[in-house]
Image: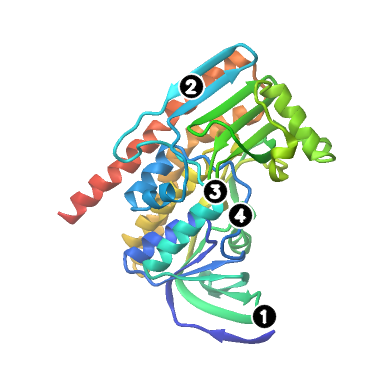
Amino acid sequence: MSQARQTSHWDAIVVGARCAGSATALLLARAGCRVLVLEAGRPGADTLSTHALMRGGVIQLHRWGLLDEVVAAGTPAITRSDFQYGMQTRESVEIRSGAAAPALYAPRRMILDAILTGAAARAGATVWHGAKVTGLLRDGGRVTGLRWVDRTTGTVHAAHASLVIGADGRRSTVAELVGAPHRQTGSSSGAVLLGYWPGLERHAYQWFYVEGGSAGVVPTNDGLACVWAGMPAAQFATATQRPDVALQELLAHAAPGLQLYPNERRGPVRGFAGFPGFVRRSSGPGWALVGDAGYFKDPITAHGMTDALRDAELLARAVISSSDTDGGRSAALGEYESIRDELSAPLRDLTERIASYQWDLSELRELLAALSRAMRPEVRALLELDEQHATEAA
C-alpha cells in the first residue's frame, strides 16, 4: 500500500452511504457543512431489504424533495395493506393519503440509496465508494478523524473532521472502533428467506401470519415483488440447506393462496439468519452513530428504512444547531439520542414481541394494532419539524 495522504479538514465524515448515511450527509451538506462520505461497497450495489417504507419514511422523502424521483423510477404506489391471519380472517386497510405522503412506496435499495447519494453529492458532499475504514484519529479521548484504504488503488488515506458519523450498519466498524456499548439488547430474532417474482399485486402490501410463521408480498420496481417468509431464527440453518425448496414450503404454510412458480422467480433466494435487536450508546467526543449502527430491530415489522430516514434528520439537526467548541455539541447529540429512543421504544418493544413468534393469532392482531398506533407519534414529530424550522427562521 502507498504512503498515507492527508486531506483537508471536514466538518463531518460519514461512514456508510446507505439510507441513514446518505440522508445524513445530504442534510448536513444542504446546511453548508463540508461532508465526506465513505462507502465500502460499489455504486449501485444491492442489499438485503424488505423495501417497505412506512408513512414516516415517505414523509421524509417528500420533505426533502426526493419522492418524485422514487416515483419516476417506476416504484408503484401502495394504497392498501392486506392482512391474513391463518386460513380464515382477512382484513384490508386503506392507506391514508395526504400531501406529504400520498401513498406508501417500497423502492429497491439500489434505487433509493442511489437517489439519496446523488442528492447528497449535488448538495456538495464528497462521496467515495470502495473505502474501507481501518482506524480512527484521536486527540486524547476525542475522535478527530479516521484512516481508510481505497480498495481500488490500495492507497491509504487519512482525514480530520469535527465529527465522525458511523452509518455503517449493525456490524458498524465505527461503533467497534469507538467502543460504543450496548445500552439495551433484545432476546428475540426471526429469520427470513426472500425472492423476487413478477405478476403479483402492484398496489398493496400483503402480510400473512400463521402460528410460528409469517410471510409478505412487497411490490417494488421493475414489475417485481419482494416475496418473503419468516420463521424463528432456530429454523434458519435447516432452511438454508435447500433455500429454494424451503421458501416454497414456508410460503405454502403461511400464505397458501399465493400462486408462485419457482421458474418465474428472478434471481436467487436470499436469507437473513436473524439478529437480536439492540440500542447502542450513539454519541461521544467527536463521534456519533445513526441508522442500524446505533439502533437495530428485527425486520419483521419493516420499519428499518423509515427509522434510518427519521434518525438522519434528528442527528443532522443536532449537528447543525450546535458548536463543537463550546460543549454544546455533546448536549445536542445527547438530545438526539433521547428523542430517537423516545420515538423508538414502543416500536422496538412491539417488534421484539412479534419477532419472538411466541404468540397466537388473536394476540398478534392486538400487537399489530398497537404497532400501528405506535407509529403515529413518529409521524407527528416529523411533520412538526417543518413548523419548528419556520419558527426558528422567523
Tag of residue 369: 2
Instruction: Please report whichever mark, 3 or 2, sits nearer to the chain's N-terminal start.
Output: 3
Q: Which residue, given by chain and number where applicable, does mark 4 sit on?
A: 46
Residue at point 51% right, 17% down? 91
- Judged by depth in the image, the label closer to the viewer, 4 or 2, is 4
Q: How many marks?
A: 4
Residue 101 point in image, percent of width and height? 35, 38
Residue 41 point in image, percent of width and height? 62, 64
Farthest residue to the bottom: give it: 3
Quarter of the picture containing the N terminus is: bottom right
Instruction: Please report whichever mark, 1 or 3, sits nearer to the chain's N-terminal start.
Output: 3
Q: Is residue 389 left or right of residue 54?
A: left
Cβ atoms under marks 4 and 2 closer than 8 Å: no
Q: Which residue, given by chain and number where applicable, does mark 3 sit on?
A: 108
Q: Which residue, given by chain and number where applicable, does mark 1 sit on?
A: 154
At label 4, the amino acid type is: Asp
Q: Secondary structure at mark 3?
A: loop
Q: CA distance from mark 1 to mark 4?
A: 24 Å
| Residue 29 found in image quarter | bottom left
At label 2, the amino acid type is: Ala
Q: Secondary structure at mark 4?
A: loop
Residue at point 31% right, 60% down? 321
Cβ atoms under marks 3 and 4 closer than 8 Å: yes
Q: Secondary structure at mark 1?
A: loop
Pointer 3: residues within 10 angstroms few (<14), some, or many (20+)? many
